[in-house]
Amino acid sequence: MANPNGSDNGREPIIEFRGVHKWYGDFHVLRNINLAVGRGEKVVICGPSGSGKSTAIRCVNRLEEHQEGDIVVNGIELTPDVRRIEAVRRTVGMVFQNFNLFPHLSVMDNLTLGPVLAQGVAKRDAEEQAAELLRRVRIPDQALKFPGQLSGGQQQRVAIARALMLRPQVILFDEPTSALDPEMIHEVLDVMTELAQAGMTMICVTHEMGFARKVADLVVFMDAGEIVEAAPPEQFFEAPTSERTRLFLSQVIH
Amino acid sequence: MSTAPGCVSRAVVTSGPRRPPPQRADSAMAWLKRNFFDGIGNMLITFGLLWVLFETVPNLVRWAVLNAVWYTPNAEVCHAAAGACWAIVPEKYRVMLFGTFPYEEHWRGVIVIAIVLGLSVISTVRRLWSYWLFVAWIAAMAVVFVLMLGGVFGLKPIETHEWGGLPLTLIMFVGTVVGGLPAGVMLALGRRSTMPVIRALCVGFIEIIRGLPLVTILFMASLMFPLFLPEGMTIDKFMRAQIAMAIFFAAYAAEVVRGGLQAIPRGQYEAADTIGLNYWQKTTRIVLPQVMRIVLPSMMNEIIRAFKNTTFIGIIGLFDVLRATSTAIQDPTWVRYSIEAYLSIFVLYFVLCFAMSKYSERVECDLAVRR
């Protein structure tokens, strides 16, 4: 197996999976996952549906619980201890496939709710920060609208801004463009690319191979609950070592 | 525009300008024919219904309006008339509206009715929804209880067993909703709790209350509950009925809220988790606002039912509007006009219930805009 521990460029790992296993009932959904993500690294995880890639990143902020092995995030090992989970969630932002914006709150309130309630940031400061982030995701004039009034691409950019509000050290993207109409995918990918260039640590589950090639430091291919291949994009796309990887690539790259 | 023949864009260009949808030409005759006389079956139904209306409406109008007596202090006048005797209402309205409340203190009841109805109307203006409205309700409830109980500011003390009529009905209703709704929300949350003991308690409570008729619960509160209390300790009948009503409402409200909770996608909880909200922040800021919007129509249904259920307290000897009315018509000179008295009370109930239903419709529309 090629480089199962992720890239070894000497950067301090901020997320580490060590021998992680997870079952849904009897179904073995994660099998011996080992992966280290360094600070500032961008990791793209791809693989067929049902391969456990979403489950893997959802374990990072404990939306899913793993049953065996260790996951360490920013030096904190994830256990059922609620304080640890909360500490990890303060470090990790997340963007979902279906945006999961709060439909009853304005864009501004969607952004400020977390910092104001969970971190005790003054409402005024949070609003300033939100306005700044909305400029950064290029929707500065939508702050007072409700999510239902925005296009999918705009909603997903709001979701990215919301994740950034807590000043996370890592952002997890769970198929961020899969629910979007084709013409909106690039506006979201552009924002993500900018974020990557600004040095944000990212783990991104996606089928956008162009994005992986351009942005990723490491591309991970998962199938049937295990990491089959993990390599820098040049190597991953040009010279995959595994037959399963080659088959997958031939299916997703037209 | 010059376009090469056979070019695809030509078809698009020639598809024409935007225009309004076609109007359906519809004369009154055509409309009548389409809706009432379309075929032999519909014609039979139309004529049949017309015959029924022709047979009933004139009689009703004669009785209720043309031959009715609207005002007289003398029951003999009604006796002589062929129509309805609405005069019983001006004659007996004090007893109907205030029941056993001491006669010379009825003005206090009037103020209570004005406060509750007035504040309800103010509460329907969405622009005024704020923390202050909540404070206003708390303050109003304090004023209501001071007025009803008396004993301070030189007001003559009135015990709760003397309360009656519309003030009692309104207080019972507001108390039921204000007490029962939060309890129902807590029960619904408890029913979905991950803690088995809490979940079992909530499920048990809801199912037991839902499995019992309101009358039984009221009887238990009124007759059995005092037997369990330690010697010398009493809770008065009004409070017992109030608690019973609130509990009954809570069990049903809980099931309505549970339905709403199930409609909230898991992603909403997860998003709230990832931005660091704790359980109560998540529940009060993310989940419940969306739940309340979803369940508004069915919750309003329960609230209106709770209002009508206040008539049950007559069974355990409290004089709500309906019971007060049946007392008012005990007077032998007027007793034969009880139908008119009851009809007036039905109108009162209908107006209040219909207002609530219309109000909930409007709130639904307001909230739908934001979706």
Image: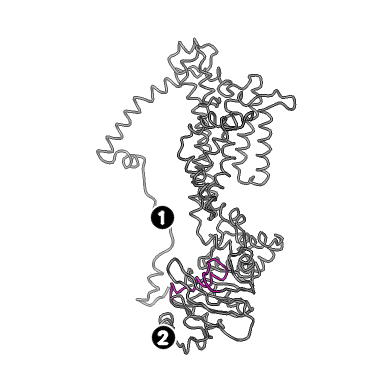
Residue lying farthest to the right in this orientation: B153
Kind of residue indicated by mark 1: Pro
Say which residue label 1 marks.
B21
Secondary structure of the residue carrying tag 2 is: helix
Label 2 to label 1: alpha-carbon separation: 59 Å
At x 57%, y 37%, the residue is B176
Q: Residues within 10 Å of mark 2 (few under 14, many from 20)?
A: few
The numbered mark 1 sits on a residue in which chain? B
Kind of residue indicated by mark 2: Glu
Q: Residues within 10 Å of mark 1 (few under 14, many from 20)?
A: few
Is B325 above or below relative to A146?
above
The quarter of the picture where residue A72 lies is bottom right
* Residue B97 placement (x, y as % from top left): 57, 24
The quarter of the picture where the C terminus of chain A appears is bottom left
Q: Are both tags, 2 and 1, on one chain?
A: no
The quarter of the picture where residue B20 lies is bottom left
Say which residue label 2 marks.
A243
- Asked whether residue A56 is drawn in magenta, I would say yes
Judge from the rendering whether residue B273 lies leftward or rightward of residue B58; answer left or right: right
Of A68 and A188, nearer the camera is A68
- Between disc 2 and disc 1, the foreground one is 2
